[in-house]
Image: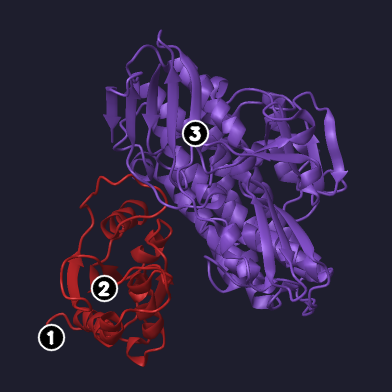
Chain colours: A red, B purple
């Protein structure tokens, strides 16, 4: 059995909006990376309720996205997520990560540990190219995802 | 004169606002559904090679890109002067049917079931899909599964669930593998079980919504849709049929492509969404509707036995030509049932694995029109190209544009029922939104924008002063 089995990686964002596509690009890189062998890797534009079932079946979920939070462009951060931190946003056809975990728990009875790995953006203008700092940091973004998987595999490490 | 503004409307695809005009006595005199964003795809495509159009135009919408792919590819094929291989016709049908399932599921379960289940006057903070998941988990589960069913078929055929590039001018880019076919057929029974359960739930609860059904754009119009020669519903192919509320045929077996012969297009200064009208009757008398309600009104039958039984029950209860736009909801569920059966029928065709899936040609005509039924109604793409196949001009007519006049009139009806004086009743606010939601308008497609935002309502006096305001 692969060490990454039952791990779900979801890279999301709009690959036509510059750095917003970083999560999508990371998913593409991870899908080809032997270090992530066994993990299920999805690339999507946004998180949707339909992902709740996939989430419920995973032992770990790693969400990879672009962030507009203050910080140095290209810097990567990792944080744990939990279900239940309800937002007041009006729901249409996409959900935020906490809502996705909440839906996974309420509809499918299981909400696994989840980690969000984010990269600070520099440019969200229309285009298929990443900015220089974000492009240069993509290996670090991928490594952060692999690190989260590794910590899940060896929690005491 | 006073004005109520709802800006923007929530749980629809795109940005809009609603304004309601009051006279000095506080009586509603007019209402407008404003679409406030512009995208300009008709200009973006100018100068591009015609064969790029399907993949370019599919970017109009993340919900129904398949419809744009099909209409665009058909317009290109008229430019190429080719007929596509029969198996490509059938494969496109399967993808379009899958898209209708997932889009209808989004409309019914994710966007409208919160109102239906929790009540139109329930607290807006909890009146969403998460509220449905808490109050009726099976309904929410069925919604998630139905949407996934459609998306996974699109993904299996096209390689990805959003913006698949598989539908191309001349056919499709690769044949269907037996393994893909069998994977799809294997999940059909589960999908059927879920839509049967949802139809039963809807019919068991329909008495709760009598008031809404009587006031949600409940007026006769013309109805338009694509119909096969045998009277069965057409989605990605078929000819046009138009009927009125008494069943009078205004068009039948009509080639839908020369739309300029039968449709007029009008614009208003307060919206980027143009209105189309039945030319023979002029503007605004030529009001008509498209989409699930209209399709069920124009067809003789759907063409799959179980769905036709449901259609008959629907007609037994509501009459042959139901007028209330509230019944778009019921019509969507019946269409989902039919689409699932039809997917299975098409995939069971012995020729479905044929590997001749694409015709190839250079541009042979200066102009082409493609027509297909999108989930929300009839979709037309019209291109003109130069001798090198470079697009010089494009025009799109989208389902939401067909329905624009009916939506505006529906808003006016609801406002007249609920608005009194200079206060904004919460019930009015909820129902004005809900009547728009019946049509499932896709403003991303029609103008072209995407997004969703909180709700703001303003009541303005004749001097522009805010008399009342509600915000979520």
Q: Is residue B247 left or right of residue B221?
A: right
Identify which residue, B63 or B369, lies in the foreground: B369
Classify B125 as above or below B106.
above
Q: Are marks 3 and 2 in contact (CB under 8 Å)?
A: no
Answer whether residue B97 is visible to the viewer in this image. yes
At 28% from the left and 33% from the top, the residue drawn is B471
On the image, numbered disc 1 is attached to which residue?
A: A157
At 65% from the left and 64% from the top, the residue drawn is B185
Q: Is residue B321 left or right of residue B208?
A: right
Q: Chain of mark 3?
A: B
Classify B319 as above or below A59.
above
At 20% from the left and 52% from the top, the residue drawn is A85
Query: What number is the disc on residue B215?
Result: none
Classify A124 as above or below B379.
below
Rendering quarter of residue B430: top left
Q: What distance separates the C-alpha of mark 1 from that of mark 2?
A: 34 Å
Identify which residue, B339 or B442, lies in the foreground: B442
Q: Is residue B344 left or right of residue B329?
A: right
């Amino acid at each position: 059995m692969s060490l990454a089995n039952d791990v779900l990686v979801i890279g999301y964002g709009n690959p036509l909006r510059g750095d917003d596509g970083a999560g999508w690009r990371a998913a593409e890189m991870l899908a080809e990376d032997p270090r992530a062998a066994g993990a299920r890797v999805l690339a999507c534009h946004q998180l949707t309720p339909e992902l709740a079932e996939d989430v419920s079946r995973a032992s770990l979920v790693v969400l990879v996205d672009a962030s507009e939070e203050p910080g140095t462009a290209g810097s990567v951060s990792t944080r744990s997520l939990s279900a239940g931190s309800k937002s007041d946003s009006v729901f249409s056809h996409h959900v935020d990560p906490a809502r996705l975990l909440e839906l996974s728990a309420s509809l499918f009875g299981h909400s696994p540990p989840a980690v969000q790995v984010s990269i600070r953006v520099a440019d969200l203008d229309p285009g298929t190219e990443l900015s220089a700092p974000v492009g240069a940091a993509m290996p670090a973004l991928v490594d952060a995802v692999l690190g989260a998987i590794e910590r899940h595999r060896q929690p005491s490490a | 004169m006073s004005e109520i503004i709802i800006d923007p409307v929530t749980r629809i695809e795109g940005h809009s606002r609603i304004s309601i005009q009051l006279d000095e006595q506080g009586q509603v005199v007019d209402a407008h559904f404003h679409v406030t964003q512009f995208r300009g795809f008709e200009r973006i495509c100018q100068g591009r090679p015609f064969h790029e159009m399907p993949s370019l135009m599919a970017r109009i919408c993340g919900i129904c890109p398949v419809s744009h792919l099909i209409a665009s590819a058909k317009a290109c094929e008229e430019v190429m002067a080719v007929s596509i291989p029969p198996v490509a016709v059938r494969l496109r049908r399967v993808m379009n049917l899958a898209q209708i399932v997932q889009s209808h599921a989004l409309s019914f379960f994710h966007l409208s079931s919160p109102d239906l289940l929790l009540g139109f006057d329930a607290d807006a903070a909890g009146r969403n899909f998460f509220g449905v998941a808490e109050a009726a988990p099976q309904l929410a589960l069925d919604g998630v599964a139905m949407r996934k069913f459609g998306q996974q078929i699109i993904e299996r055929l096209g390689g990805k669930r959003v913006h698949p590039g598989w539908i191309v001018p001349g056919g499709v880019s690769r044949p269907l593998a037996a393994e893909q076919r069998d994977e799809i057929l294997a999940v059909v029974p589960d999908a059927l079980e879920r839509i049967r359960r949802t139809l039963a739930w809807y019919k068991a609860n329909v008495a709760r919504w009598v008031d809404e059904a009587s006031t949600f754009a409940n007026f006769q119009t013309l109805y338009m849709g694509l119909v096969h020669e045998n009277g069965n519903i057409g989605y990605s192919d078929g000819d046009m049929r138009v009927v009125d509320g008494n069943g009078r045929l205004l068009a039948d077996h009509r080639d839908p492509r020369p739309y300029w012969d039968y449709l007029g297009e009008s614009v208003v200064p307060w919206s980027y969404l143009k209105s189309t009208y039945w030319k023979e009757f002029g503007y605004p008398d030529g009001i008509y509707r498209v989409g699930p309600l209209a399709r069920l009104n124009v067809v003789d039958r759907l063409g799959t036995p179980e769905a036709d039984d449901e259609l008959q029950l629907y007609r037994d209860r509501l009459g042959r030509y139901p007028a209330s736009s509230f019944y778009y909801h019921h019509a969507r569920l019946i269409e989902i049932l039919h689409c699932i059966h039809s997917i299975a029928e098409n995939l069971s065709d012995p020729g479905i694995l044929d590997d001749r899936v694409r015709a190839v040609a250079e541009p042979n005509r200066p102009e082409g029109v493609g027509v297909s039924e999108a989930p929300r109604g009839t979709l037309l793409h019209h291109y003109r190209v130069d001798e090198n196949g470079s697009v010089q001009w494009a025009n799109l007519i989208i389902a939401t544009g067909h329905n624009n006049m009916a939506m505006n009139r529906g808003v006016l009806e609801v406002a007249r029922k609920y608005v009194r004086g200079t206060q904004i009743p919460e019930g009015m606010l909820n129902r004005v939104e809900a009547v728009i939601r019946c049509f499932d308008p896709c403003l991303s497609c029609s103008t072209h924008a995407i997004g969703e935002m909180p709700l703001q309502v303003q009541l303005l006096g004749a001097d522009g002063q805010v008399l009342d305001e509600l915000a979520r």
